[in-house]
Amino acid sequence: MDDFGYGRLDSPLMTRDETHASPGPLAIDMLHEGDCLDLLARVPEGSVHLAFADPPFNIGYDYDTYDDRRTADDYLGWSKRWMAAVVRALRPDGTFWLAIGDEYAAELKVLATRELGLNCRSWVVWYYTFGVNCRQKFSRSHAHLFQFVKDPAAFTFNVDAIRVPSARELVYGDRRANPTGRLPDDTWILRPQDLPDGFVADGDTWYFPRVCGTFKERSGWHGCQMPEQLLGRIIRASSNPGDTVLDPFAGSGTTLAVARKLGRSFLGCELSAAYAAKVRERLAGVSPGDPLDGAPEPLKSVPATQDGRRVGPRRAARKASRPRAK
């Protein structure tokens, strides 16, 4: 038995029948299939060290089973219910990270702090290129990441586990730069190495690439896949080896896979049977200690634009000859 009073299973594989066979507390190190509100009610109160949620944004995305076209009131009411269930599951020193889009970021922050009693430690803006192309507004290229804690005086934040290279090292090549780096800022951008004067060391910049369709780590069956390195930073910062990480919307399974790789226990909920089956396949190929997908430090591993592939003369001539939209 584990510290929370329920059975610990070594394999992340669980059939649908096994998931619904027991009405008792959820076993850890497993993905559980079903409605997150039903499943979260079976998580022992005060047992989870870290929760990360990337819920539907209510923008009409085509999920396998979930309807992403709720009325605003219905969506906010549902959000309050599942967020309250997450808060109940958190330990007194627990942390809750929430990823959300522009449409409901403000409402969910107010809900978490003023109605559910959480404290917002950081409001991170994760910026990326290759975002959603829009026709009559600026193209979407960011998401919001809220870091909430139950107790502002007692929570996990592992500074040395998430240091990044400083501008002094990367931009100016200063030998006096701290070799251990510095704490990340609270805006995460894809390619700051191309804008050395635009993102200074004391600014609000984070850097992680979005998992695009051409990336080798792309699952291919789920359109909303978080980068493993982004989850790696959150899990390293807000939990310790052996802690339990909860994701009420497992989706492509990134949170669970990263937690397993980093030596954490995990609990996952997923409504779609099709997604759940794919996540179990993904978890079956993951072991503690495996490296995370993506560059460990993209600032050092990705070449600057001037060092990248150049367009050949024929291709450039073809592009120049094409009529431009007016």
Image: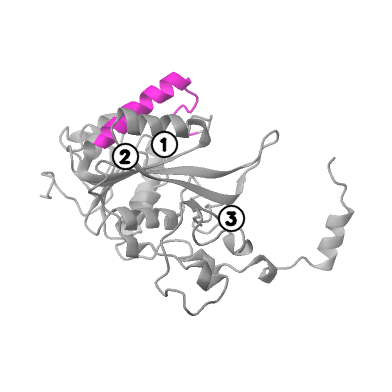
Q: Position of residue 109 (x, y in %)?
A: 40, 34
User: Residue at coordinates 39% horizontally, 57% vertically from top-left?
Assistant: 233
Q: Main secondary structure of the magenta part?
A: helix
- Disc 1 or 3, which lies upstream in sequence? 1
Magenta stretch encompasses residue 264: no
Above or below for 257 versus 75: below
Residue at the disc numbered 3:
214
Q: Amino acid at mark 2?
A: Asn
Q: Alpha-carbon distance for marks 1 and 3?
A: 24 Å
Q: Amino acid at mark 3?
A: Thr
User: Residue at coordinates 60% horizontally, 46% vertically from top-left?
Assistant: 131
Q: Nearer the viewer, residue 104 or 302?
A: 104
- The image quarter in which residue 48 lies: top left
Foreground disc of the pair 3, 2: 2
Determine which of the numbered discs, if any, sits on residue 119 in the image: 2
Q: Is disc 2 placed on a helix, strand or loop? A: strand
Q: Position of residue 129 (x, y in %)?
A: 60, 51
Q: Amino acid at mark 1?
A: Pro
Residue at the disc numbered 1:
55
- Magenta stretch bounds: 63-87
User: Residue at coordinates 66% horizontally, 39% vertically from top-left?
Assistant: 138
Q: Alpha-carbon distance for marks 3 and 2?
A: 38 Å
Residue 267 in sight from this viewpoint = no
Q: Is disc 1 placed on a helix, strand or loop? A: loop
Q: Is residue 35 left or right of residue 44?
A: right
The reply to whether discs 1 and 3 touch (Cβ–Cβ < 8 Å) is no
Which residue is most to the bottom? 175
Foreground disc of the pair 2, 1: 2
- Disc 3 or 2, which lies upstream in sequence? 2
